[in-house]
Image (spheres, rainbow, N blue to C red):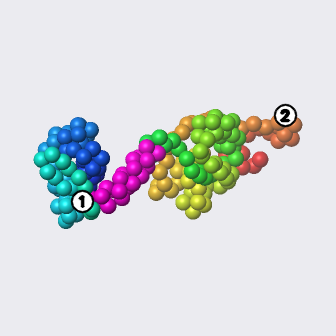
Amino acid sequence: MDRLTPLRAFLAVAESGSFTAAARKLGVSRSAVTGHIQELERHLGTVLLNRTTRRVWLTREGQRYANRAGRLLEGLEALDAEMQSRSGRAEGHLHVEMAESVANARVIPRLPEFVRAYPDISLRISLNEGVVDPTVSGADIGLRVGPLRDSTLRFKLLGRGNYIMAASPAYLQLYPPPRHPDELRQH
């Protein structure tokens, strides 16, 4: 049973003292309001409203129900408004684990932008050069470079980068420059 629609109809009648006024307020027909009240009274097993052709008033049970139900509905409406105002707003704690090279090259330069965009996020960054399973380390997200080794983890490619190998002129005077990646093992 939809409990809110009959409850709103009952409270509208209790407040206005009229089925017609309640129907106008709710934007429905008078017969719809009557049906909702009857449905609610059947569900509760008690009469909430006394009715005559000229007047509608609350029974003792109706008064008790209106008082408590009104507070509940106000609380629900306040909760709805709060949630709607927060809709789409990120908040909470975020633990991100990444390699130091990723942090220095990609993340740290953009941290001020992130903090401005998401002021309600408490960010924790852990630096780890090894491949760590975020489900084991407790991180919410892991930023990694290279292929994903664990197929049970979900991933999204954030970008591609090129790597270059560099050496100082002094180093290259002592050791010959490698001609093939396999020669890097000797350096």
Which quadrant of the figure contains the N terminus?
bottom left
At label 1, counting other C-alpha atoms closer than 10 Å, the crowd grade (few under 14, some 14-19, many 20 or more) is: some
Residue 116: x and y, percent?
Answer: 63, 36
- Whether residue 4 is in magenta: the answer is no
Q: Secondary structure at mark 1?
A: loop
Secondary structure that dominates the magenta span? helix
Q: Which mark is residue 59?
A: 1
Q: Is residue 112 left or right of residue 9?
A: right
Residue 177 vs residue 35, the one in the foreground:
35
Residue 56 vs residue 124, the one in the foreground:
56
Residue type highlighted by circle 1: Thr
Report the residue at 19% width, 56% height from top.
50
Q: Are marks 1 and 2 in contact (CB under 8 Å)?
A: no
Residue type highlighted by circle 2: Pro
Report the residue at 36% width, 58% height from top.
68
Q: CA distance from mark 1 to mark 2?
A: 96 Å
Residue bounds of the magenta highlight: 62-82
Residue 71: x and y, percent?
Answer: 39, 54
Q: Secondary structure at mark 2?
A: helix
Report the residue at 52% width, 54% height from top.
149
Residue that mark 2 sits on: 169
First in sequence: mark 1 vs mark 2: 1
At label 2, counting other C-alpha atoms closer than 10 Å, the crowd grade (few under 14, some 14-19, many 20 or more) is: few
